[in-house]
């Protein structure tokens, strides 16, 4: 029998911007794992992330940042791996073998290389009233065609169960239409979004900055 997973000795602290999909993926996992946490909103428009107090947490001035006792950990996908490994190693969020591990890392990479410029970027520009580059939208469609193909083989991005890669992809994908990247041609992707939204502890991503 597996030993019970540890619990935090005090609530975790998540420094975030509420409308950030990078922050949202971490909050999703915290909620789905039922971990105690407090939210610390960082006012990026006013440059709070460039002040010494925040730069002491992350010298790059980026959110999210997780505090767990003396541990200070930035970068959303790294935080996901830490939380699942430390607090839910047997809950299915982590790979079971080398193939799943490689697949999850691939989707993590695509969440930076394609999801960022192809969905997060157009969404941000739309929310801030800036013109959107059609080439960025085309990149989003290139990515979502790959996602649609993958979902013809598995109900989630990596396997038959939700994993961290799904949380990394959910937020910006769900709001890609805000940036003019329609999901109408991707029925499997839309069904995948609904499966994520049906998971216990789901929290929606705010659609306003």
Image (tube, grey):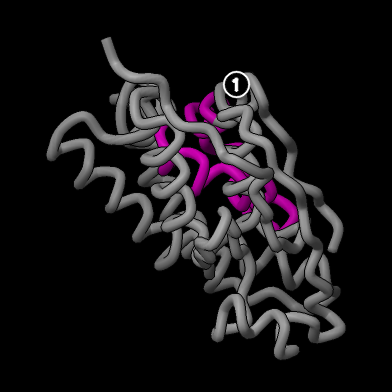
Q: Is 33 situated left or right of 14 in this image?
A: left
Other-residue count near label 1 (Cα within 10 Å), few / some / many at <14 / 14–19 / ≥20: few
**Residue 63: x, y in percent?**
63, 68
What secondary structure is the stretch in magenta mostly built from?
helix
Q: Position of residue 106 (x, y in %)?
A: 28, 52
Residue 41 is left or right of residue 33, and the answer is: right
Q: Which residue shows up at 83% across the image and 74% down it? A: 43
Which residue occupies the foreground of this view, 104 or 177?
104
| Magenta part of the chain | 163-192
Q: Is residue 191 magenta?
A: yes
User: Is the residue 2 above or below the residue 145 in the image?
Assistant: above
Q: Quadrant of the N terminus?
A: top left
Q: Nearer the viewer, residue 179 or 107?
A: 107
Asked where in the image residue 122 lies, by quadrant, the reply is bottom right
Q: Which residue is mark 1?
A: 199
The relative height of residue 25 versus residue 150 in the rendered view (above or below) is below
């Amino acid at each position: 029998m597996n030993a019970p997973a540890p619990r935090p000795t005090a609530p975790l602290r998540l420094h975030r911007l509420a409308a950030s999909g990078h922050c949202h993926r971490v909050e999703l996992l915290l909620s789905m794992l039922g971990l105690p946490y407090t939210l610390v909103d960082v006012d990026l428009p006013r440059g709070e992330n460039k002040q010494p107090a925040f730069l002491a947490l992350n010298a790059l001035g980026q959110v999210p940042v997780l505090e767990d006792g003396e541990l200070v950990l930035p970068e959303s996908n790294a935080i996901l791996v830490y939380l699942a490994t430390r607090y839910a190693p047997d809950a299915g969020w982590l790979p079971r073998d080398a193939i799943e591990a490689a697949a999850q890392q691939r989707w993590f990479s695509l969440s930076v290389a394609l999801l960022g410029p192809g969905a997060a970027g157009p969404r941000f520009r739309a929310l801030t009233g800036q013109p959107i580059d059609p080439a960025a939208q085309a990149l989003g469609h290139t990515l979502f065609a790959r996602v649609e193909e993958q979902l013809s083989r598995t109900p989630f991005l990596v396997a038959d169960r939700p994993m961290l890669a799904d949380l990394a992809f959910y937020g910006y994908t769900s709001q890609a239409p805000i940036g003019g990247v329609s999901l109408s041609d991707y029925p499997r992707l839309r069904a995948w979004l609904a499966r994520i939204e049906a998971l216990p502890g789901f929290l929606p991503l705010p659609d306003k900055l």
